[in-house]
Each structure stands twice: as C-alpha cells, then as structure tokens.
Image: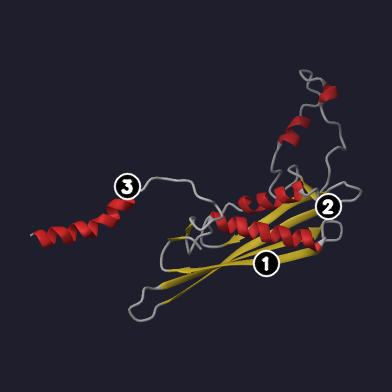
C-alpha cells in the first residue's frame, strides 16, 4: 500500500500547492500577467492603446492651434468578437494620452447614443428655476462642438490545429481598427490597425 500512497500523494501535491498559493499583485504589463488565448487581457489593452496613441500623435492629424487643443467626440466602437468587451477601456487610455499631451479634449456632452455625461444638459434645465441663482447657470452658446470623431472596430478571428498526440493549439487574432474623422469635411484624416495574436493550448502566465 505504501507505494500507492506515495503515488497518490505525489499526484496531489501540485493541486495542494496551487490551492495554497497566496494572492499577490503583479505588474499589469509584465510577464507574470495571465494570458488567455481567446480573451483580451489587461496587457493587451495597454499595448494596443499605447501603439494606437503613438501612431495618432506621430501622424500630426490632431494639432492644437495657438496652444488651444482640438475637441474630440467618441463615435461608435463596434465589437465584432465573441466576447463582451468594455470598449471604454481602450478609448479612455487614448483620451487620457491626448488630454495630457495637450492635443485634444474630449467632449462628454455629445455622443451617438446621447451624451456620455448628461450633467451639461441637466444644469441648463435649471434655467427659470427660482430656487437657483440664474447668474450661476451657463448661458446659451457656451457648449463647444467637436472638431473630430474617433470611431472603430474590434475584430476576432480564431483558428486551431492538432498534430498527432499533441494537444490542440488554439490561436486568436484580435484586430483593433480606429479612424479619426474631420467633422468639418467628413474625411478620415487618420486610420490605423493594430493586431494582437495569441496562441496556446490553455491559459498561461507570461507572454
């Protein structure tokens, strides 16, 4: 029985070690991050957002005039993948970079499905309300119309292959496509596509 006990114990040790592993913080852009073949991970968002932002900035498509940044609105980002995606995760990183770089400010008062933030409209509905000091309420003609819109699409393509006794290898390709449109002319003044390709038989740690 002893050899059998040793065999069972040896088989259980990895599971016990995994179960006893303590939670820890990891670098969100480092090799300790979990990589899921069929999903977009945090490090994917960071990488794509950085690459798209750099492409947009280097293109010179958005230039402040006399130190005054342009105004950007966020158009529709289509999700053509098999998973639920919060596209704000991508767009927010790009918006922050453009804001910090002094190139563009994002309007939250205009959106294809209504304003991102309805506060600008709500405060104007206080006009003629005697409970509020009317001199503190924004007058007409103060909202700023956007100069550009940023729209795009996320596409997923899957493939798999199996050779002999080897485990099935899965591959997922995510294409992130963005277009910057000059709202005065209706022309796309910048367009870019970045790819994330991941391959493996299961979720893993690292790249």
Can you identify the residue that label 3 sits on?
A: 20
Choose between 148 and 141: the one closer to the eye: 148
Question: For mark 2, does the 10 Å Cα neighbourhood hold few (<14), some (14 to 19), or many (20 or more) residues?
Answer: some
> Which label sits in the foreground, 2 or 3?
3
Q: Residue 135 is drawn in which quadrant?
A: top right
- Local SS, label 2: loop
The location of residue 15, given as percent across then percent down, is: 29, 55
Scheme of image coloration: secondary structure
Q: Is residue 204 left or right of residue 15?
A: right
Q: Which residue is at 63% across, 54% downward?
A: 90
Q: Which residue is at 71% across, 54% downward?
A: 75
Instruction: Name the disc covering residue 143, or none.
Output: none
- Local SS, label 3: helix
Can you identify the residue that label 1 sits on?
A: 193
Q: Residue 190, relative to residue 127: is it above or below?
A: below
Residue occupying the far right of the picture: 66
Residue occupying the far top of the picture: 131
Can you identify the residue that label 2 sits on?
A: 147
Choose between 76 and 199: the one closer to the eye: 199
Task: Kindly check if marks 3 and 1 are in contact, taking CB atoms under 8 A apart as contact.
Answer: no
């Amino acid at each position: 029985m002893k050899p059998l006990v040793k065999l069972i114990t040896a088989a259980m040790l990895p599971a016990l070690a995994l179960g006893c592993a303590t939670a820890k913080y990891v670098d969100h852009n480092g090799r300790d991050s979990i990589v899921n073949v069929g999903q977009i991970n945090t490090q994917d968002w960071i990488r794509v957002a950085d690459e798209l932002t750099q492409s947009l900035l280097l293109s010179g498509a958005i230039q402040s005039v006399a130190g005054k940044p342009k105004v950007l609105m966020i158009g529709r980002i289509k999700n053509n993948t098999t998973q639920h995606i919060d596209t704000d995760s991508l767009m927010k990183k790009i918006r922050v970079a453009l804001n910090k770089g002094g190139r563009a400010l994002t309007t939250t008062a205009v959106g294809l499905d209504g304003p991102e933030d309805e506060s600008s409209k709500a405060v104007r509905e206080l006009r003629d309300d005697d409970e509020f000091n009317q001199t503190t309420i924004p007058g007409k003609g103060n909202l700023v119309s956007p100069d550009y819109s940023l729209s795009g699409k996320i596409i997923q393509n899957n493939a798999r292959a199996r050779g002999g006794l080897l485990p099935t290898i899965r591959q997922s390709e995510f294409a992130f496509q963005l277009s910057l449109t000059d709202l005065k002319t209706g022309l796309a003044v910048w367009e870019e596509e970045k790819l994330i390709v991941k391959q493996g038989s299961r979720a893993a740690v690292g790249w």
